[in-house]
Image: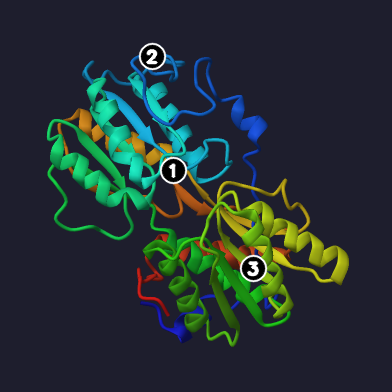
Amino acid sequence: MVTSRKLRKALSKTVAVVAVIVLIVAVAAGFIILQQPGVPGTTTSPTATPTTPTTTPTTTPTSTPPPQFKLATILPGSIQDADFNTLGYLGTLHIKEKYGIEVAYSEGVSVADAERVASEYISLGYNIIFFHGGQFVSVGQKVANEHPDVVVIITGYGRIENLPPNVWQLDPAFHKGFYVLGAIAANVTKTGVICYVSGVQLPFTVSEVNAVIQALRDLGKNVTFIPVWTGDFNDPVKAKTVTANLIDQGCDVVLSSLNLANYGLFEAIKEANATKGLYVLATTKYTDKSSMLPNNLITSYIYDYGVALEYIVGQIFRGVRTGYYEIEFGKASYIKFPLKFVPSEVNEWAMKLQSMVATGQVTVVFNTTKP
């Protein structure tokens, strides 16, 4: 790991004022254009004739997979969240376009229903099941054990040992980007207080918090950091209340790890700006949401799940039924540049730090122990 002194030297051109915040896009209207006729707005389980994207690929497949493969994706939330679930949906469409195989999806699936939904897909001939969400790790392994002829893709954080022989693990490695976001926030804050708002306290959210703490330590920043979990990634009311309270405590840079609840977080920031004369910045992840908070978002932590799914499904076609794939930071996941509302020197510094993390010059520890 790079020492605090070495890292500060490597980043000597750092400007003490760095503004970090989230900008994000994925507006539902633009996203809906990507849907094809026949894709349901709400699907909770497959039917005898799945209402899914048509089996005829929208583009010519770049490879010819065995004809028997069919992919079904199980999503915990709405595909129109312009966030995590949207990315899972778009990744599924990418597989259809890339390989020309039949795909289907179910959205808004709870952990309690996930096994049933997966089993129904399997009964319809779907033999690649993708569970898009860390809450499905256990049920995904159970489905794999009960259906050895099916390949299951689970989303898990940190390498999971002793997986069934027909399970692929997709690891988003969120902690790496949060190291960079934490470093930017530490340089941007004027009050000396930064905060983190997430939904449920899961291993991946704890790892994000620990990555921020590591960044503050490595940079030698004397900054107060307050992490809070609202209990729900998608409840905007809770997110607004928590964010408003954090702003009252002096937080002027908010690192978001929410989904639909971002709307509440954004409202709290807008109200603080309008009624209290405070200038609060923020960052988000998954998609560019700059249109939702155009005057306060500096950057977003962007993800492309299509890259990961393309690799894993391609390996399955080649007969490789188990493996581990980490989404590569700096390529399929990255901090969006240029940063907004910051001097050019700050933008250059942050780009250099991202490169150092991506190339391994800075090692970000995956730590799931609550601080």
Q: Is residue 298 visible?
A: no
Quarter of the image for the N terminus: give it: bottom left
Q: Gap in Å between the C-alphas at discs 1 and 3?
A: 23 Å
Image disc number at residue 224: none
Disc on the earlier residue, 3 or 2: 2
- Tell me the kind of residue under disc 2: Thr
- What is the three-letter code of the residue carrying label 1? Pro
Q: Which residue is mark 2?
A: 55
Task: Using a 10 Å C-alpha cutoff, classify the residue at mark 1 as few (fewer than 14 neighbours), some (14 to 19) or many (20 or more).
Answer: many
Q: Position of residue 324 (x, y in %)?
A: 24, 49
- Disc 2/disc 1 C-alpha distance (Å): 24 Å
User: Which label's residue is closer to the chain start, 2 or 1?
Assistant: 2
Q: Nearer the viewer, residue 168 or 371?
A: 371
User: Measured from the top left, where is residue 238 in percent x and y?
Assistant: 62, 61
The CA distance from mark 3 to mark 2 is: 45 Å
Residue 300 versus residue 123: which sits nearer the camera? 123
Q: Amino acid at mark 3?
A: Val
Locate residue 213, reporting x and y percent: 48, 78
10 vs 156: above or below: below
The residue where tag 3 is placed is 242
Q: Residue at x 87, y 67 (%)?
A: 275
Foreground residue among 335 and 240: 240
Residue at left offset 36%, top offset 24%: 46
Please tell me whether mark 1 sits on a helix, a strand or a loop: loop
Looking at the image, which residue is at 34% across and 22% down?
99
Quadrant placement of the C terminus: bottom left
Judging by the rendered image, the residue that carries numbered circle 1 is 76
Query: Tags 1 and 3 in contact by the CB under 8 Å rule?
Result: no
Q: Which of the two discs, 3 and 2, sits closer to the camera?
A: 3
Disc 2 is placed on an element classified as loop
How far from the left and from the top, in percent, is residue 174? 43, 59
